[in-house]
């Protein structure tokens, strides 16, 4: 079940990333803030291995006998981010919250000082003769 939820979150994350303006710099910051470590590429073998990884995709692999998540950052630092399952979980949580925040900000007009207020919105609607509809259905008895 946990694997299914992780896949579902990743799928939602991918769809949301395609739907919004997303900058690779913010992903690098999220990775670092979540506990991922930046590994520089120092040898030709490391560079060749780096190039064989799927670009812009978190991948689970084994590193020094431990299960880790890796992210090859080709655009910003030309390095490899590596993190534990805990770092990955923190990243997913932060990235999801960032996407929600971005979407909420897109939904509201930035010129309005107040966010959506359902009570105020209902009070400003033109209801017309809607309140007389009860009489049409025989709800009022004379």
Image (cartoon, grey):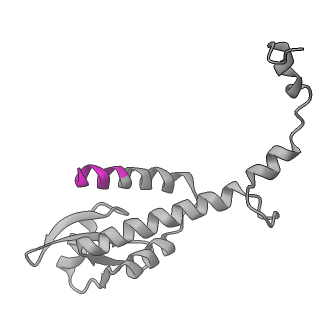
Residue numbers of the magenta segment: 1-8
Chief secondary structure of the magenta portion: helix
Work out whether residue 132 can be spotted. Answer: yes
Residue 121, relative to residue 75: is it above or below? above
Count of numbered marks: 0
Please give left or right for residue 102 compared with residue 54 in the image.
right
Please give left or right for residue 98 compared with residue 9 in the image.
right
Question: In the picture, residue 132 is in which quadrant?
Answer: top right
Q: Indicate the position of residue 2 as horizontal and vertical percent values.
A: 24, 55
**Front one among 5 and 78:** 5
Residue 43, relative to residue 7: is it above or below? below
**Front one among 84 and 75:** 84
Q: Residue furthest front?
A: 142
Please give left or right for residue 90 compared with residue 69 in the image.
right
Q: Residue sitting at 21 percent across and 80 percent down?
A: 44
Q: Residue sitting at 77 percent across and 64 percent down?
A: 110
| Quadrant occupied by the C terminus | top right
Q: Indicate the position of residue 91 as horizontal and vertical percent values.
A: 38, 70
**Front one among 31 and 8:** 8
Q: Indicate the position of residue 99 as horizontal and vertical percent values.
A: 52, 61
Work out whether residue 73 can be spotted. Answer: no
Q: Residue sitting at 77 percent across and 58 percent down?
A: 109
Residue 76, relative to residue 61: is it above or below? below
Q: Residue furthest left?
A: 65
**Front one among 133 and 46:** 133
In the rendered image, residue 30 lying in the magenta stretch gets the answer: no
Question: In the picture, residue 138 is in which quadrant?
Answer: top right
């Amino acid at each position: 079940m946990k694997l299914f939820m992780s896949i579902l979150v990743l799928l939602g994350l991918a769809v949301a990333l395609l739907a919004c303006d997303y900058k690779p710099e913010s992903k690098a910051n999220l990775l670092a803030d979540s506990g991922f470590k930046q590994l520089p590429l120092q040898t030709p073998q490391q560079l060749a291995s780096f190039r064989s990884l799927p670009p812009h995709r978190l991948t689970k692999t084994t590193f020094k006998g431990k299960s880790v998540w890796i992210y090859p950052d080709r655009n910003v630092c030309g390095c490899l981010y590596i993190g534990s399952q805990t770092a990955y979980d923190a990243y997913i949580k932060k990235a999801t919250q960032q996407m929600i925040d971005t979407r909420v900000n897109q939904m509201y007009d930035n010129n309005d000082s107040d966010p959506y207020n359902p009570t105020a919105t209902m009070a400003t609607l033109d209801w017309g003769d809607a309140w007389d509809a009860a009489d049409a259905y025989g709800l009022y008895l004379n």
